[in-house]
Image (tube, rainbow, N blue to C red):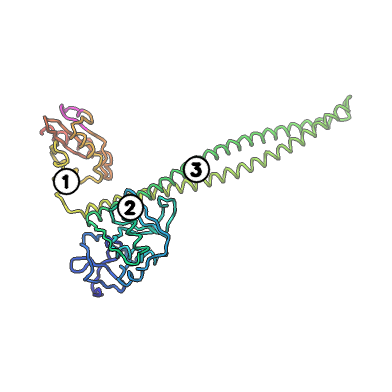
Amino acid sequence: MEVEAAIRRPVRLTPNGYAGVAYAGSVYALHVGDVIDLSEPSWEIADCDRFLFAGADIPYAPTSDDVDAVTKGFDIDWYLESNQYGHYVVFNAPERVASQLVGALEAADLSVQRWDVSHRPADNGNFYDWFARLRFKGSRGEALALVGAVISPPAVAAPVTAPVDPTAARLADAEARIEELLDQLYALNQRAEAAEREVAHLQGAVASAEANERGHREALALAERRRSDLQSQLAALRENVGSGPDTAELVRSLADAEELRELALAENATLLDRASSSELEAEEQRSRADDLADQVGALVDRVAELEALEMERLRAATANRPRRGGVAEFLPIAFSRLDFILDAVDVIANLESPSSIMRALAEIDAGQLVGKDLEGMPGWFEVSKLATGIAGSQRLGRIYYKPDGGRVFVSVHIKQDEKQQKRHIDRLRAV
């Protein structure tokens, strides 16, 4: 059926990477012409929680005619890489042929988890244009046979099957996204470290050039003083020539002085040239160091952006997960020995970054004595300077706990000021 034009249906991405729209409670593949086929397999709406941005090209799903057009195989350079994350078909082909190959793999029941432009070399050392990650969980030999049957099919195609668990497929999508982000983060870290090393090297070169420049300027000043002395001697000699008893000796002294003057002028010119060259080199080194510092700053910003994207992805994944009772039901399960008192549960539920406090609670639940004695409260302990992720209270998380036989009373608190913290400790006295 053709999708109704009067109804605004957002375009989703199905688990196999093609476009789809929701209809009658399910998601169907979207074909060229904005049509769907109700006789085709469909997906649950929860399995298609990714949407296309406005204006993006729509990756229409291939039709049976598209699949029939490539049943004779593909004349491409390809390779199958198998690692701890699964099987990857990497190949060289134009984008149209790449789309047809992915469609042919899907038609052969080899579900494609994700395909995109390849940015890294395969484990055989070669670079390829595209990669397609398969959901197939069998051995490499089985995957190689199935992919080979699609790219270079036999005269009579043998049936192939590759069952896919929807839950495992969603988990594999998350793993693929994490893997992609980690690859980008690793590459950016490598570039940032290399840039920092280059900046340090250039800063050393600039310092050396500045030291050489100072030495040249001192030598130049010395040569100027020497020239001034020689000129004074020459003037005195000229005044004394012909008036003293030993005129011949004075003439020889004059000739020697002139020679020394010529040598000083030549040395002075050389030093001036070297000083000028050193200044130019130092300026170039400073400019290059500034450029590299800017690159390092840009790389650091990119790393922070990737980390923010990963945090957003994790939050989105958590938001889409079925609700399981919240923090109040999670804490007794995670920490069997801890009794949370006062408003500890609400404080934990409102943390932006609970990892630091959760780590300390795990150590307390394991029977470890962490932190220090709480002053004026015998039997109570305090763990301070815990990260909260809350703006203005980044390192103001506190845990107060008191072992009592096989149980431990625990209060989680975020310090605002000394007066408010004292009121909270006074409340603990009544427990």
Residue 341 locus on image (x, y percent): 13, 38
Dot 3 or dot 1, earlier in sequence: 3
- Which is in the foreground here, disc 3 or disc 2? 2
Residue 171 locus on image (x, y percent): 25, 53
Q: Quadrant of the N terminus?
A: bottom left
Q: Main secondary structure of the magenta part?
A: loop
Label 3 sits on what residue type? Glu
Residue at image x 30%, y 62%? 17
- The local secondary structure at tag 2 comes to helix
Q: Is residue 379 magenta?
A: yes
Residue at image x 17%, y 54%? 322
**Front in this rendered view, residue 188 or 163:** 163
- The local secondary structure at tag 1 comes to helix
> Is residue 379 left or right of 9 when viewed as pictured?
left
Quadrant of residue 269 in the image?
top right
Residue 323 locus on image (x, y percent): 16, 52
The part of the chain drawn in magenta is 373-382
Neighbour class for label 1 at 10 Å: few (<14), some, many (≥20)? some
Q: Is residue 140 magenta?
A: no
Neighbour class for label 2 at 10 Å: few (<14), some, many (≥20)? some
Residue 312 shows in this picture: no
Q: Which residue is mark 3?
A: 198
Q: Which residue is mark 2?
A: 140
Q: Is residue 187 above or below residue 203?
A: below
Quadrant of residue 415 in the image?
top left
**Front in this rendered view, residue 420 or 210:** 210
Discs 1, 2 touching: Cβ within 8 Å: no
Marks 3 and 2 sit apart, C-alpha to C-alpha, by: 42 Å
Label 1 sits on what residue type? Val
Residue at image x 36%, y 57%? 89
- Tell me, for residue 327, which label it has, or none: 1
